[in-house]
Amino acid sequence: MKHSIRAAVLAATCLLATPAFAAGDAPMPPVEQHACQRECLEGYVTKYLQAMSDGVVSDDLFARNARFTENGMEMPLGNEGMWATTVAPEGYRLIVPDVETQQVAALVTVKEQASSSATGPQRDPEPVGMSLRLRIDADGKISEIEQIAARPERPLGPGAAAPSSPFPATGKAVEAMGSPWEGYLTAVPEAERHTRAELVAMASAYFEAVERNTGKDYYPFTDDCVRYENGIVTAGTPDTGARAGCREQLQTTLIGAVTSIRDRRIVAVDRERGVVFAFAFFDHRPINWTWQLGELFKVEKGQIRRIEAIFIRGPYGVCSGWSTYEQCRSEEPQDVR
């Protein structure tokens, strides 16, 4: 599959000068005039996070049959997961609207107040990092909610020591970034915009580069590529403090680390800004370890310039809750529409 993806990406680069929605895009239904546009879709993220903070599931905002998952588990909407503990909706916002599919995805933080255990003392509000997807139905209601919540590690009872970790809590680290990199919000010149199929292929090319990496594969990165994971720079240029660049890291250190990347779901594509948002699972089979993540990519002229992700460790082999078993086990990308 690595060779087929590489061929697709190279072909995409050659098509940059073609008109919008060039050959290679699957047919999309026309976007209705009354459908939610960019600012409207971005506004749903704000409305959703406020509703979660308030603990109010209103018929004005949510479809009666709205489906909700957190960390791959389907739960009742309104009183479980982050709905039970969010106390303030303010925080970091990096939003990717998809006007064509009426979905919107985002990397965000909110404030959560929780106890150190079921019987432990109440803690002060703490930021929690979230990867989020919403689908808006034809009636303007939120019908699907998918989120990954990266909470801080907490002690398990009164007097217990907090778990030790060499990394800062995700929410705190993401909020320390301040505002999103301005390049995510910058429109690509119209003549240089990729088709949807090309952007989907680029996201999958990244996953192919990481999966079963040999150090000699195709690495579709610009020379100034930077990657943030849970608010920390993990690859980039020397001025970012990273030990290696996006390409160099895969060529030298992350060889054979990830044994499978599966349930690859491309859930939001912003063609105007060249940004793609995906959910996926990174398996490390020898140690029974799975990362469950939401990740986005800024694509320019056939290469990835910026990467940002919020993720958690999940049970080995966990699925998204939105795919069939076969899709969950598959390494083929899904363009979720």
Image: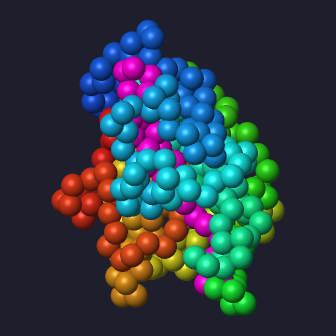
Q: Say left or right for 50 vs 242.
A: left
Q: In terms of depth relative to the viewer, which is nearer, 329 or 132?
A: 132
The quarter of the image holding the N terminus is: bottom left
Query: Where residue 196 appears, x then y in whole percent?
Result: 40, 33
Q: Residue furthest top?
A: 33
Please check the rendered image and state whether residue 247 is part of the magenta-colored stretch, yes or no. no
- Residue at x 36% of width, y 33% of height: 64
Q: Is residue 105 visible?
A: yes
Query: Where residue 288 appears, x then y in whole percent?
Result: 37, 84
- Residue at x 55% of width, y 40% of height: 56
Instruction: Answer above or below: position of 207 versus 196.
Output: below
Q: In terms of depth relative to the viewer, which is nearer, 136 or 39?
A: 136
Query: Where residue 311 appears, x then y in whole percent?
Result: 53, 64
Q: Is residue 270 visible?
A: no
Specify the segment rendered in magenta: 132-156
- Residue at x 63% of width, y 36% of height: 46
Instruction: Answer above or below: position of 310 versus 241.
Output: above
Please check the rendered image and state whether residue 134 is part of the magenta-colored stretch, yes or no. yes
Q: Quadrant of residue 212?
A: bottom left
